[in-house]
Image (spheres, grey):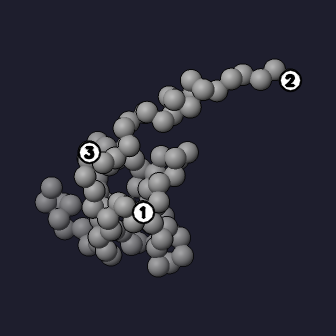
Amino acid sequence: MADEEEIAVYDEVEIEDMTFDQTLQIYHYPCPCGDRFEIALADLQDEATDIAVCPSCSLMIRVIFDIDDLPKPDSDPSALAEQQVPVVA
């Protein structure tokens, strides 16, 4: 945990201010460089990290969230898989 405290973050952002991509299962937020910060839902659920990174520059943000407010793991992908019907051409 000492390593996490030493990370210099650009900002702290509430998860409610981020956009969730249902397909990719990631949260993203605009970065000043023009790209966007990204963090995977699985990383937040596992409490592996709360740091979202921008793939284009060196900036990072800390995501402020409550674990209980996150979407449930694998609830959406499995539901979509069950609803899909094979189509024969």
Rendering quarter of residue 73: top left
How many residues crowd mark 2 within 10 Å: few (<14), some (14–19), many (20+)? few
For image coordinates 30% across by 48% down, the residue present is 69
Q: Residue at x 33, y 75 (%)?
A: 10
Point out the tag, 3 or 2, that comes first from the N-terminus: 3
Residue type highlighted by circle 2: Ala
Residue occupied by mark 1:
18
Q: Secondary structure at mark 2?
A: loop
State the quadrant of the C terminus.
top right
| Three-letter residue code for mark 1 | Met
Instruction: Determine the CA span between mark 3 and mark 1.
Output: 17 Å
Height in image: 69 above or below 74? below
Circle 3: element type = helix
- Residue found farthest to the left: 2
Mark 3 and mark 2 residues within 8 Å of each other at the beta carbon: no
Tell me the residue at 68%/23% (across/down): 85
Up the image or down, 83 lies above or below 48; here it is above
Separation (CA) of disc 3 from disc 2 = 44 Å
Q: Looking at the rendered structure, which numbered label has been put on residue 68? A: 3
Location of residue 74 by image quarter? top left
Residue 20 falls left or right of residue 66: right
Q: Which dot marks residue 89?
A: 2
Q: Secondary structure at mark 1?
A: loop
Position of residue 77 relative to residue 13, above or below, is above
- Residue 87 vs residue 58, the one in the foreground: 87
